[in-house]
Amino acid sequence: MRYRYVTADVFTGQTYCGNPLAVVLDAQGLDDAQMQRIAREFNYSETSFVLPPKDPRNTAWVRIFTPDREVPFAGHPNVGTAVVLAREMVAAGRPTPDAFVFEEAAGLVRIALRSGASGVESAELLAPQPLSRASEVSAAQLARALKLEPADVDTSEHAPQVVSVGLIFLVAQLANRDALRRASPDSHGYAALLPLDGAKSIYVYTTDTGSDTIDAPTDIQARMFTGRMTEDPATGSATAAVTALRAALRGKGKLALRVGQGVDMGRPSLLLAHAEPREDGVWAGVAGHAVVVMEGSLPAPLVT
């Protein structure tokens, strides 16, 4: 049996920018090990697998795999999968709803669809969990993991800290754009620091955006490094978590941020994030465009 797939570049309106995603459609019949092998074959930061929903009131059950593990939630797979599924519905002559609800391990992910001249072009998700905060680490520990100096880490607003709105990251603010540009993962520093409270990746950002603009000025510029010593071009779940953290520190009102990522690796991305403190916690979301790049089919892998 063969399975259709579509790839999309997410958090961009241009092909070969943003964060690439593979979406395997109608993935019934694939087991965990087969999904993992397919994700490893694509070798993108994530691959999503679309399955029938457990609750018929929802749109789909979506499972998300990195090349080495399944994750309970991620940002760019939700935005990309939503745009791809809407495109599939249009191609099949089916009406497209205003919103989807995806079932994921972290909870229900609600996604609003946005249309443009060529149909559904973007999506906005609400993270499945409110902000949670866990361990803090020192500037020296963070700096060692990214080949920086402790002075490159800005702790004036918050220490490097483990945070999550559905997927766990260690996040830190850097002093300036130069420090962000110089950041590079160090395997020994990483191993000494992570995993921590479930965090396996480091997301760093700066409010010193300089001349880094994507269509319009950004509020922060960011980079994200994984435990595989790779860099992610656009990380919606971490961006939402940082926006929630900054909203929590500010203490009142809705916070909206234009976030640039992927600039230093040649895949510029734009993420539109928002967060708002409520009585039951700080809730965050992120929006962005996605553009389809490739389509094809693949066989179910043999797993021994």
Image (cartoon, rainbow, N blue to C red):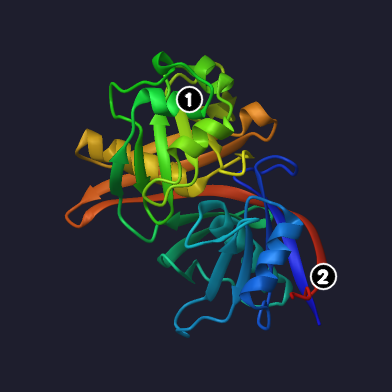
Q: Which mark is residue 144?
A: 1
- In the image, residue 49 lies at what x, y percent? 63, 69
- In the image, residue 44 lies at what x, y percent? 69, 51
As drawn, 252 above or below 81: above
Quadrant of the rendering where the C terminus is positioned: bottom right
Label 2 vs label 1, nearer the camera:
1
- In the image, residue 215 lies at what x, y percent? 59, 30
Quadrant of the rendering where the N terminus is positioned: bottom right
As drawn, 79 above or below 299: above
Which is more N-terminal, label 1 or label 2? 1
Who's the residue at 54% across and 28% down the image?
A: 216
> For the residues marked 2 and 1, what is the alpha-carbon distance in whole angstroms?
43 Å
**Res 89 → quadrant:** bottom right
Q: Circle 2: is it few (<14), some (14-19), or many (20+) Cα within 10 Å? A: few
Who's the residue at 38% across and 61% down the image?
A: 128
Residue in the foreground of this view, choosing between 217 and 265: 265
Task: Give the amino acid at mark 2.
Answer: Ser
Q: Is residue 210 visible?
A: no
Q: Is residue 27 visible?
A: yes
Judged from the image, the secondary structure of the residue bearing numbered disc 2 is: strand
Instruction: Say which residue label 2 marks.
Output: 297
Task: Give the amino acid at mark 1.
Answer: Arg
Who's the residue at 33% across and 43% down the image?
A: 244
Residue in the foreground of this view, choosing between 51 and 291: 51
